[in-house]
Amino acid sequence: MRIELATAPGTPDRPNEDWTASVLPASGRGGGLVLLDGVTPPQGDAGCVHPVPWFTARLGGALVELSGSRRDLTLREILAESIRRTADAHRSTCDLSHVRTPQATVVVVRWDEAEVEHLVLSDSVLLLEAPAGGVRAVLDDRLDRLPRELLVSDAVADARARNKEGGFFTAAADPAVAERAVTGRTPRAEVRALAALTDGASRWTEMFGAGDWAACLGILEKEGPQALIDRVRALEDADTERKHLRGKTHDDATAAYVRL
């Protein structure tokens, strides 16, 4: 088994709000992967005294522990319990009802000899490669399906779409959001490799169209996750007329590759 992880902050003067880790149980049977993309709040009060990296580290740590030790729980149950634990860690000091309370997108993958389980919430990406080479992208595309008028500003998206019916969902303080996650199971024999990308890394395909998902996974296999991030940064720097870029020039970027 081969596991490679790489991450880079969007800018050197801001902390990286992405988080990733792999899970390899002591039994040597199976494993897992967790990847989070923290949601950067706009300037102003978010009702919480903790920064986003505190939240992603807490949530990610709980996801790693439970996905590795509680095979009896589904990934949705693991996400719900991890959100609950993280909320309890700052419930007494922070306003968890605030629409911008710290939150994150989530990818969790767990595998054993029989199958590969997955969970995706919001706009991070999971790629599954078949033994014959075909690549399937597992996406939670609710954000992409929103009317453009809801995305004209953070305030409008927060008020009308964030963690609301008919909108899009992220892992924040409500464990019930786990039921909104995209989940599935694939026979282990049908998965040769897998990869998880935050939207800062998936820009290579989704924003710049430099290659399809199969080509993206090919870079991860042949050159490693850091090479994909480096290619994204080169494309961002070259787009001086902002023909492709929307919002921030550089985003936190994280990529993980697993060859089973």
Image (cartoon, rainbow, N blue to C red):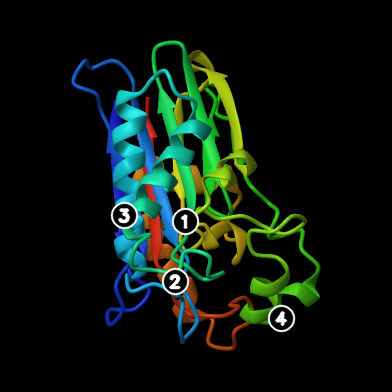
Residue 90 image offset from top left, x and y in percent: 33, 60
Horizontally, residue 45 falls left or right of residue 22, namely right
- Give the left or right position of residue 4, taking residue 181 as reference: left
Measuring from the top left, give residue 65's x and y in whole percent: 29, 35
Q: Amino acid at mark 3?
A: Ala
Which is more toward the observer, 118 or 202? 118
Mark before the other along the chain sequence, 4 or 3:
3
Mark in the foreground, 1 or 4: 4
Q: Earlier in the sequence, mark 3 or mark 2?
A: 3
Which amino acid type corresponds to the residue marked 2 in the rendered image?
Asp
Please say whether residue 224 is visible from this viewpoint.
Answer: no
Residue at numbered disc 3: 89
Between the residue at mark 3 and the residue at mark 2, the CA separation in whole angstroms equals 28 Å
Q: Residue at x 32, y 64 (%)?
A: 53
Q: Which mark is residue 230?
A: none
Q: Secondary structure at mark 1?
A: loop
Q: Disc 1 marks which residue?
A: 198
Camera-side residue: 250 or 92?
Answer: 92
Decide which of tag 3 and tag 1 comes sooner along the chain: 3
Residue beneath the point at 42% across and 18% down: 72
Instruction: Write down the residue under mark 2.
Output: 251
| Residue with the mark numbered 4 | 152
Q: Position of residue 59 (x, y in %)?
A: 36, 50
Q: Quadrant of residue 158?
A: bottom right
Query: SS for tag 4?
Result: loop
> In this view of the protein, can residue 254 be seen by the observer?
yes
Q: Which amino acid, by three-letter code, is at mark 4?
A: Val
Q: CA distance from mark 1 to mark 4?
A: 22 Å
Q: CA distance from mark 4 to mark 3?
A: 33 Å
